[in-house]
Amino acid sequence: MYLALAGETYACIEEFRSLMWRMIVKTAIQQRVVLPLRGTIEGQWGFAVDLAEQAGNRTMGLLARLAELLMRIAHEEKTPARDAALEAAINDGDCVRAFARLDQLAGPEKNNAPIVALDVAEKGFTLSGRKSAMALAARMARELSGPERRQEAEWETAERLGYTEGVVRQARRILQDFGVLRCRQGRKGAEFAPPTAPTGVIRLLAPSLVASAALALDIRETIFFLVSSATMLAAARVKAADGPPLRLIAPSSGPDGFEAIILENKLLERSGNPLLSIVVRSLGLANTFIARDALIPPHIGEITALNRRIVRAIDLGDATTARGLAQTKFDLMQRPTGCYRDVA
């Protein structure tokens, strides 16, 4: 709903799924996962979800399932459960060959395809047969965003659509969390406004990640991969005149967790993928609840120094330098993954 209301296209979903696939395949190769024999029971969510479960990372599996769900809503295409060429590359420990096969499986990008219409979202929420607040929220968002939108009181919406006033009130609160509705006291109905920030989506997604019983170790491993991937996306999209410069903050005397987080957020925004940004921030919030502390990157001094240079290269429009530094950061942030798992 948020991506549709924000006017995004399916490019961000396809790119997010591609990142999930690469993350899971790389993890499986690092963990030397032994793939099941042919003919065994296969899951309904495709090879990426099954592979994440075999690698033992519940968080990666959950995000792969999210990406697959969004793609199915979009095109009704299902990811294959098994692929012989991909499995051969994984068994050989060949990341380059595995990634090339993933690109073939993804197929051509549908960059210009619009995000799912809100009426489809409404139907999806009513599959349970209940008149839920989420289904009504999708219906209200669709109506309020249309050319003939009109304001009406809660009781009028309830009477017209056959909901109780309590459900209408709950649906409005959902849309207020999304930043889609502004309800003013003393005025009839609600005002529609496109969402300006994904804060409400993050507040809804983070508790779901916590409730999935994910381990802090799995969440951190996932965050490190996605943050370094976001930096590589930002570097790949370098344009000297594209948007405001990423202003550097004054260097600190020593490793500073606050500065590291500020720079990571700047690069995350420049990745150009709103879904990736939402997921990373939701993971960070979930980690705070599960691990009881903020997530500080490993090798914080080196990461901060690299981020400063990456930001400077992006500001100068130097794509070659930005990509090279992003790859160095990616390799550095992947380094402790195996160590953490060995200790665990």
Image: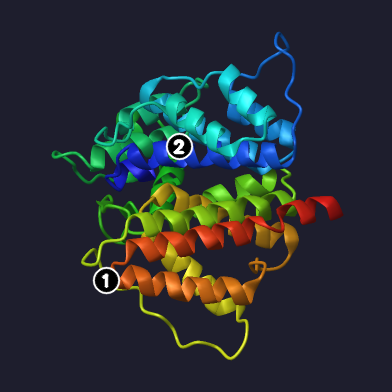
Q: Residue 73, position in %: x, y?
A: 41, 26
N-terminal-most mark, 2 or 1: 2
* Residue type highlighted by circle 1: Pro
- In the rendered structure, are the residues bearing label 2 and label 1 in contact, judged by CB atoms less than 8 Å apart? no
Q: Residue furthest top?
A: 39
- Mark 2 or 1, closer to the camera: 1
Question: Which residue, given by chain and number where applicable, does mark 2 sit on?
Answer: 134
At label 2, counting other C-alpha atoms closer than 10 Å, the crowd grade (few under 14, some 14-19, many 20 or more) is: many
Q: Residue 87, position in %: x, y?
A: 63, 24
Residue name at image x 25 percent, y 44 percent: 152
Q: Which secondary structure lies at badge 1?
A: loop
Q: Is residue 215 visible?
A: yes
At label 1, counting other C-alpha atoms closer than 10 Å, the crowd grade (few under 14, some 14-19, many 20 or more) is: few
Q: Residue furthest left?
A: 147
Q: Residue 68, position in %: x, y?
A: 50, 30
In the picture, the disc for residue 244 is 1
Depth check: 243 or 37 in front?
Answer: 37
Q: Quadrant of residue 313?
A: bottom left
Q: Is residue 209 left or right of residue 22?
A: right
* Residue type highlighted by circle 2: Met
Q: Quadrant of residue 319?
A: bottom left
Q: Residue 229, position in %: x, y?
A: 50, 53
